[in-house]
Image: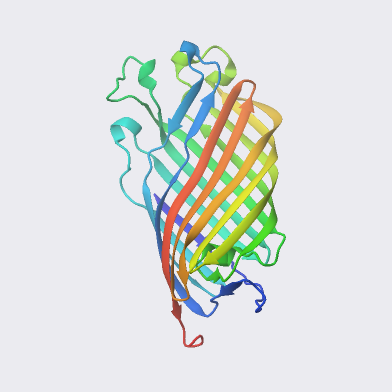
Amino acid sequence: MVFIFISAIRLFGQENDSLPYKMYKDRFVMYADVGFNSAPFSLSDNFQNGEDKLKYKNNISPALGIGVAYKWFALRVGFTLSGNLKAKNKFGETNYFDIGLKFNIKQVFTNIDLRSYRGYALKDEYKWNDSLNELTPNGIYPNLTATSISANVWYFKSKDFNMHPVSGRVGHYNRSAQTWYFKSSINFFGITNSSEIVPDILADSTDRMNAQSIGAIDIGFIPGYAYVNRINNWQFSVFGGLGGVLQVKNYVINGNSRSFLGIAPRLDFRLVGGYTKPGYFIFLTTDFDVKSIKIQSLMYKQSFYQIKLVAGLRIKTKKSI
């Protein structure tokens, strides 16, 4: 799968000596990144055979990205490398697709993402499926697909906090900064399969356990706190927030859909850290997006997360010399 990430709307606010960060606006930035994305999920309910929780895992593929940035323009193209990290006889094969847009205007940072994972393994299905054993313990579901479409906007209260130098590509911090922030979020996410998501042997006669699709559309608000600092060229930042969303959730069985209205908690958490000097940088970035749906006694939880190592050069142009 080819993952294309385009961030072409990057507007820098005016900078002055009182700000705690340095922006290298006149340097041409070239960088590359390597990492992986994953989206495991679980289903909890009173299943047959005494089971109360099913864990579904995707097979992870490494991803490579190459990007450039200059002034207001930034472009990154990424590729999922061939091959999965886990054994295919145990975890099958997962096809992954991701496309996104990010931009920052002064104290507002916006992130729009589409993610899709096709192909999952159900952990330890051999415990109730006689066709499996400890050598091939997991059930393979090649058509089981998880999808997430998200639009998130962070507003940072302090003018000292800016996502451009936090990410480390086109700038970095010279001293610490911290702020309260407010995140608004609109999401569509869920799982679908060509047949029932829960194996027949574990499902009773209730509709929710025989669903071929479970999903939700929600809108939420998350207050949080962010901190960034740079000490001896080592920079690190952490974000943490907790809030809630209003959901329209549904499941589909045999072409018939049932919808419900509800609320759910939301966690916002990310870590960014690394080594940065005017001419180059290397950063480790993480991003965790935890989503959940509860329909009667059925609980669906999914964690979309990303871990990536980013390294690059900030090259002087004639204007900046």
Residue under the image location 50 percent in, 46 percent down: 115
**Which residue extends farthest front?**
232
Q: Which sits in the foreground, 37 or 100?
A: 37
Residue 148, how many percent across, how many down?
55, 42
Q: Reply above or below: 300 against 221.
A: above
Q: Which sits in the foreground, 248 or 181?
A: 181
Count of residue discs:
0
Residue 3, how many percent across, how many down?
44, 53
**Which residue extends farthest left?**
135
Please identify the quarter of the rendering in which residue 245 is found: top right
Horizontal relation, residue 26 to residue 259: left or right: left
Residue under the image location 66 percent in, 43 percent down: 242
Please identify the quarter of the rendering in which residue 124 is found: top left
Q: Would you say residue 81 is visible in this rendering?
A: yes
Q: Reply above or below: 76 against 87.
A: below
Please identify the quarter of the rendering in which residue 153 is found: bottom right
Horizontal relation, residue 43 to residue 225: left or right: left
Residue 165, how many percent across, how many down?
56, 67
Q: Reply above or below: 73 against 272.
A: below
Q: Would you say residue 8 is visible in this rendering?
A: no
* Scheme by which the image is coloured: rainbow
Residue 282, how many percent across, how many down?
43, 64
Q: Which sits in the foreground, 155 or 273?
A: 273
